[in-house]
Image: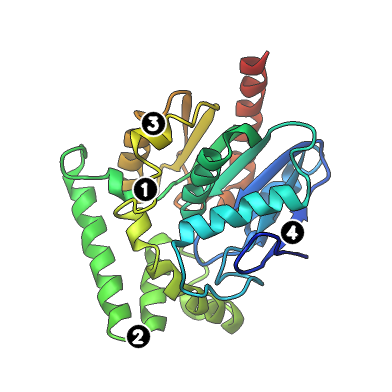
Amino acid sequence: MVAISTGLAQPVASHVFGCGPRKVVAVHCSLAHSGAWRGLATILEEQVTVSSFDMLSHGRSPDWDGKGLLQLRNAEAGLALIEAENLAKEGPLDLIGHSFGATVVLAMAQMRPDLVRSLVMVEPVFFSLATAAETSDPEALEALRRDHMTVRETYLNGDVEHATRLFNRAWGAGHPKWNDLPESARDAMVRSFPAVMACDTQVYEDMLGVLTPEKLARVTMPCLLIDGGKSQPIMHEVIRALAARLQDVTCRRIDSAGHMLPITHPAETAALLQGFWPEVARSEA
């Protein structure tokens, strides 16, 4: 583990997996940590070197200090990691993000497009795209609103653990069950949950503005969007709406997977990356 602090209001813990020539920076989902990439990186270890960091309030990084927008703060941490480790010394690199981490890598790509060769967003939670005017699945939108309101009301009523459990039930892998998780894992998720709730303005309202035409115009690199066939239906709506706004985009689905596909289906995810990256190389030629 290495602590990255230069230029940051708070340091973050970083980790490296693999030893391959392709440089990749990966950002994990909410309630997880950088170790979530271990399975995928192990499969690709001879092809890629994956650098990741624990988002604020996650893993071994400190609790968020309550200042600024977490989407931006974590994007700044990712860029600081690239600079501290000199990861772009041989040219642009690849970004991968999962769930809220996918919203972070989009912000990183917009802030420093010169550093980014390709952008992979796995189940990006840009719920602000799933509006009543755009969705082709109104029931999916209503289910999202209903489930989120239940979680948020539980949280605001002071039962953080139960709210975390409800959130994990909706977006986690579904196994092991909450009561079967080690106490340390449950405690870690409860610790992270206030930061997750603080991100509502970014995922439901796009407070940072990463989905504006001006910001999206900066995303000229090849993009891969991945979702799971068994994920919440709203994710399919988000993918469709986001793909329509990107200049160079490929969409792929892992039919047997849910929202946590980089963790539950690392081999299938690796296969999609192995199919996508050669296309990136050809587009550069």
To which residue does mark 2 refer?
159
Amino acid identity at mark 3: Ala
Q: Nearer the viewer, mark 4 or mark 2?
A: 4
To which residue does mark 1 refer?
126
> Vertically, is 42 above or below 176?
above
Q: Residue at x 41, y 75 (%)?
A: 164
Q: Could you tell which of marks 4 and 1 lies nearer the N-terminus?
A: 4
User: Residue 107 location, x and y as percent?
Assistant: 49, 45
Q: Residue at x 39, y 82 (%)?
A: 160
Report how far apart the C-alphas of labels 4 and 2 lie in the structure.
Answer: 32 Å
Report how far apart the C-alphas of labels 3 and 4 lie in the structure.
Answer: 31 Å
Left or right: where 40 falls relative to 214: right
Amino acid identity at mark 4: His
- Looking at the picture, tell me which residue is in the foreground, 193 or 232: 193
To which residue does mark 4 refer?
15
Q: Could you tell which of marks 3 and 2 lies nearer the N-terminus?
A: 2
